[in-house]
Every structure is written in C-alpha cells, then in structure tokens.
Amino acid sequence: MKLIIVSGRSGSGKSVALRVLEDLGYYCVDNIPINLLPALIHTVINDYENVAVSLDVRNLPKDPEDIPEIIAYLPRAVDVNTLFLDADDKDLIRRFSETRRLHPLIKENMTLEQAITREKSLLEPISTNADLYINTSQLTPHQLADLVRERILGKKTGSMVLVFKSFGFKHGIPIDADYVFDARFLPNPFWEKSLKGKTGVDAEVKDFLASQAIVTKFIWQINSFMMTWLPHLERNNRSYVTIAIGCTGGKHRSVYIAEMLAKNFRKEREDIQTHHRDIHIKST
C-alpha cells in the first residue's frame, strides 16, 4: 500500500493537495490524530492501495519528535512518502487576512505572526524529512493542483523525475528550482514585431531561436551539464530535480529552451515534465 502524508503550515494549500489526491483515487483522511495512524493503516491496508492523511499542527503528538517513531509502527508493506507544503510568512499572513480565518494557534493567545513562526518550529521534524517540499507562495490554487498532480503521478515509476520549468525573471525566480539558467543574454523574439505576441511553443518563435547558433550552443551545454551530474543525483536518492530556465518575461526564450531540453531528455528517460510558469502572463 502507498501512503502519502500531507503536511504543511496552515494556509499553505493542504486542502487543495488532499482534493487532488482524492481525485487521483486516494482514500483521504483529514485531521486524524497522528497517534491513531498505525491503527488506521492496519484497518484499511487490505481495502485500499493508496491512502493519504493530513498531518498538521492540529493533530501533532505532544512531542513532534515522536513522529518518526509512530510511523515506524506502520506495516513494512506500506510505502510512506511525505508531501510538505509551505509558503513565505508574508504570504501566509496575507492569506489569513484575506479569508479572515483564525490560525489554529491563535487560541494560545498569540498574534498571527507569532502563531505562524511557532507553527514552523513545531512542524520542523516533518519539513526537514519530507520527500517532496513545495513552496506555494507563487502558485494559485489551480497551479498548485496541477503541480501536485504532476509530482504524484510522476512518482509512480519510482525513478527520478526531471522537471524543466520556464519563468520570467521579472516575476521572480521559482523557489523550488534546483538549478537556474539565465537566458536573458540570448537574442529576444520579443523585439521582433511579428513574434512579440507569440510564445516559445509557436512555430515562428521556434524557427527564429533555432536559427541562432548561440541558442543552440546554450541548450547543448545545459544538456551536457545535466547529463553529467544526473547519475550522481540519482545515487543520492533524489525523487525530483527541477531545472529552471529564465528569460525576461518567461514567454519566448525560456519556454523554447525548456521544451528543447525536455525533448532531448525524453530520448533517454521516461519521467520528464515541463512547466511554463509565466507563459500566459500579459506583457507590460
């Protein structure tokens, strides 16, 4: 049986993740006391192949350091993975202010800022050992749902997943990036009148960039670099590697390069994903 523990700070998107897992066929249990987890799993192990449970500050044991010991009581046949969702403090404060919901720790006479900081400390035994960590600060609920779906489905084969992500530096560097490559020095289709309104997946933009020798060399060198070091990352038991390619706006050069890299790696590997973060943001 496969068990996914969904954890994270309040307001980071755990409910969205659980809904995605439920849609993927997981038997989902929200807010179960962690001490009851072994009993739950022993009860459902013969009925469900995939189970997901949420674990947050509401249902922690008195000593959060006891969590690994509790998980150790699970049957050996259970494949346990932890998904931890988080966001920057300022974004969590904004989300609580917008929804006007009470933080679970507010009842302990803390301010919202103090509660968010305290929650981070309480959940540290989980966050530091998570198999998959997602910062949701720059993600809409729809984008988060897509990302969780990609990550969960990608893990089915058990091999390392490569994610090639395009982005625009003007909108910030992706927090989940393992490697970041800057394509802003390359010829920019944005300044070509006929190409400005198109993107890196359109044939005209692809033809323009493919005709530039410096673009081809840039792609080749990133490809060579990743091919050299991926085997070492796999031996270190990495589940995911995100390679982020950035240009100014995230619509032309970075999109094209991410797609070309993914195309090259699909010749050698199965678990390849692409994500174009800023491709639909209107240019200003």
Image: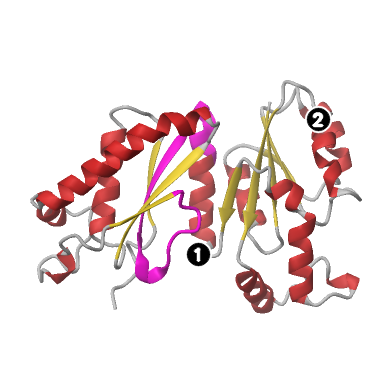
Identify the amino acid type marked 1.
Gln
Callout 2: helix, strand or loop? helix
> Bounds of the magenta span?
152-178
On screen, residue 138 versus residue 22, left or right, reads: left
Crowd band around label 2 with a 10 angstrom C-alpha radius: few (<14), some (14–19), many (20+): few
Pick the front one: 8 or 238: 238
Residue 188: where, in percent of width, then height? Answer: 17, 64
Q: Quadrant of residue 284?
A: bottom left
Residue 259: where, in percent of width, then height? Answer: 27, 46
Q: Which residue is mark 2?
A: 72
Image point (61%, 50%), residue name: 17
Q: Tell me if residue 143 is in the magenta stretch.
A: no
Residue 185: where, in percent of width, then height? Answer: 22, 62
On screen, residue 274 versus residue 153, left or right, reads: left
On screen, residue 208 versus residue 269, left or right, reads: left
Q: Tell me if residue 157 is in the magenta stretch.
A: yes
Q: Which residue is mark 1?
A: 138
Callout 1: helix, strand or loop? loop
Identify the amino acid type marked 2.
Ala
Q: Quadrant of residue 187?
A: bottom left
| Vertical arrangement, residue 275 with respect to residue 271, above or below | below
| Vertical arrangement, residue 142 with respect to residue 110, above or below | above
